[in-house]
Amino acid sequence: MKKLLYAFLLTSGMIAGQKATAQCPAGRYNTELFTDYTVTTVTYSTPHNLQMDIYQPTGDTYTNRPVMLLAHGGSFISGNKTADGTVVEMCKRFAKRGYVAASINYRLGDFFSIADSNKAIAIVVKAISDGKAAARFFVKDAATTNTYKIDTNNIFVGGNSAGAVLFMHAAYLNTFAEVPSYIADTMLTNGGFDGNSGNDGYNLKIRAVVNLAGALNKATFVETGNVPSVNVQGTDDVTVPYNCGKPMGGVVPVTLCGLGQLEPEYVARGIYHWSKIYPGEGHCPWNGNTTMLNSVDSMVRDFCFSLMCTTGIQENRSVAGVSLYPNPAGATTSLSSEAAMGVITITDYTGRVVRQYTPANKNNFIINTSDLLPGMYIVRVAFADTNVAPVVKQLSIQ
């Protein structure tokens, strides 16, 4: 059985910039406070007759609830709101925790179309339009009938495989100006940037993205100020490439960049994120694996809780100034900190811990990098004072 290694990465800028906003009611959102859930099927996109299943905690009287909106996998050519076991199970669990959860249908293509680059882009753009409309459905409901009694400041979106690809693009391509021309042209024929899937006139609100083996067409779509994300993927994934490549083992002639390329961008741009990497695993290893699914679900639960609840992130946490020089490094590099350092951990981009130190000199430490292979690494500094947020630096070794 393969040994599980993972990267669990936070930066000081992420923590400082994404503080939790409220004291959550006891037991909500991090425990299954409710024993059951109810499911209602609604049409969220009238133009395309698209439905979603909405899961709510049975007997809940709370009137300001977060939303967990998820999309199924299936390579944009198959699947539906009930067929993805991971999505359905997570909807059930999040409903029991006090969320409104939803699993959506979205427009699909066929195998022959997905093998043509122009048609493949059109298929994905239509799905992105549908995902945006599904999120706007809840914003519209809150502003009108308020049937689902949600907090529009806490709409979490994401999915499994293709569903994660869908919502990653909905979240990280957040202005038309940053859309490449080859995607923009297709968007314009599909109703423009917001799409033609309905619920017009309501702003798309995304608190964070749940990225289960998803990707972006370009990792550089991640920009400073983007929304947080929680990410999991196997390093041997070829259906959605862990680095950059053609999906489905090269069948789809469009590039996708997975967590191996997204992780450095998150760090460089100061995006609050949690990432778990499964070395040696392929596509969505948690599908049908209860132990892995429990681990993924718990991580997503704790990540969302950290964003919503003051008990998840200490709001009064301070940030220490840390410098890493030279960077890129040769044989050595030096860490200097204005706060007393506790544990220094260095990982590579597979999540493997390659160094760990507890320095005697708490403010200055020289790291010997002479025997590390050239490449990119993550240096994480935890502090003796737990009121000081951990700092993560990206280190290049030449």
Image (cartoon, grey):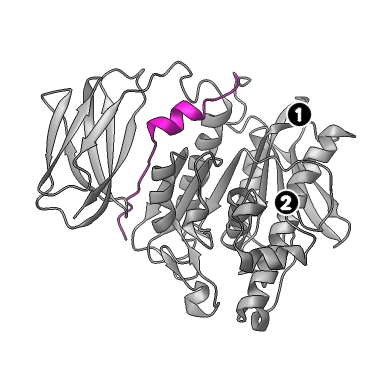
Q: Which residues are magenta?
A: 2-22
Mark 2 to mark 1 CA distance (whole Å):
27 Å
Left or right: 378 in relation to 43: left
Left or right: 31 in relation to 366: right
Mark 1: which amino acid?
Asp
Of residues 273 and 32, the one nearer the viewer is 273
Mark 2: which amino acid?
Lys
Res 377 visible = yes
Q: Position of residue 375 (x, y in %)?
A: 24, 56
Res 79 visible = no
Left or right: 270 in relation to 135: left
Q: Which mark is residue 132?
A: 2
Look at the image and say whether residue 116 sits in the magenta stretch.
no
Q: Earlier in the sequence, mark 2 or mark 1?
A: 1
Q: Which residue is mark 1?
A: 60
Look at the image and say whether residue 20 sits in the magenta stretch.
yes
Label 2, secondary structure: give it: helix
Q: Residues within 10 Å of mark 2 (few under 14, many from 20)?
A: many
Label 1, secondary structure: give it: loop
Q: Residue at x 20, y 28 (%)?
A: 336
